[in-house]
Image (spheres, helix red, strand yellow):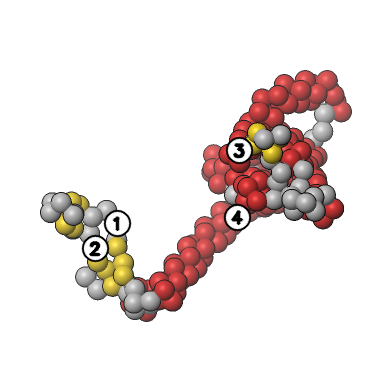
Amino acid sequence: AEAPAAVAKAGGEYLVRGGKFETLEGTWQPARIAMLRFPSFEGAKAFYDDEMYTAARAKRSGATSFFNMVLVEGVREGVTSRDRSIAMLIIFVFNVLFWMFFEQAGSSFNFLAQNIVNRDFGGWEFQVGWFQSVNPSAILALAPVFAWLWLRLGKANPSIPRKFGLGLIFNGLAFLLLMIALASMVDPATNKIPFWTLFMVYVIQSVGELCLSPIGLSMVTKLAPVRLVGFAMGGWFLS
């Protein structure tokens, strides 16, 4: 079959597209993926960039449709529902920002842990992958404390927007600590920052997660248009 425009434009061709392909052992197996060949690295990169742009455009289109549906339904149900829908969508946007920064824990923070954090304790080295246990350990240790605190506060218990704001603030404080460490705590002998700084970044982010994450579904049920509560819950998980 003729290659799609994106493949042809990059000068590529299909090695396998549907049907079957021959393995090294000489047997034929169903082809569940497409194998492409390009004449140069530049061609492959051009195809990849084009596909990423198309995927990003589709995601933007889906997000726009979601926002429009919620707003239209909110307006249809009245002024109060409209205002609640707008507030919910604003919170969705900040939720995306929160998790964008929070999920650096599994990507760029690993790079920091491996190359810029002093993990040596007198000949014993704290492994990079072990940093991923800090967040769940902090959640298990602090969740009962937060559950007790919210009940203890009673009528002074912060509202949903305030808890959401606290989550964002703690996330920001975690990155502020990291910025201070990289700016003024680098050991000249090793060019690395102290272990405790990255450790506390994970802990502070976990505190922010405990403020923000548990309120999501409760917030959606209170603010979403009645007919779109389930749909809005899906939007919350997607965000």
Of the numbered discs 2 and 3, the one sitting upstream in the chain is 2
Of the numbered discs 2 and 1, the one sitting upstream in the chain is 2
Q: Are marks 3 and 4 in contact (CB under 8 Å)?
A: no
Q: Which mark is residue 127?
A: 3
Task: Give the x, y percent position of residue 144.
Answer: 72, 21
Judge depth for marks 3 and 4 and give the one in front: 3
- For the residue marked with disc 3, what is the amino acid? Gln
Q: Residues within 10 Å of mark 4 (few under 14, many from 20)?
A: some
Horizontal placement of 155 versus 227: left or right?
Answer: right
Q: Residues within 10 Å of mark 1 (few under 14, many from 20)?
A: few
Horizontal placement of 47 versus 17: left or right?
Answer: right
Q: Residue at x 29, y 61 (%)?
A: 34
Q: Are marks 2 and 1 in contact (CB under 8 Å)?
A: yes
Judge depth for marks 1 and 4 and give the one in front: 1
Q: Could you say which is closer to the camera, residue 82 or residue 137?
A: 137
SS at badge 3: loop
Determine which residue is flagged by label 4.
67
Q: Residues within 10 Å of mark 2 (few under 14, many from 20)?
A: some
Q: Residue at x 55, y 46 (%)?
A: 238
SS at badge 1: loop
Q: Which mark is residue 16?
A: 2
- For the residue marked with disc 4, what is the amino acid? Phe
Horizontal placement of 24 versus 222: left or right?
Answer: left
The alpha-carbon separation of the residues under discs 3 and 4 comes to 43 Å
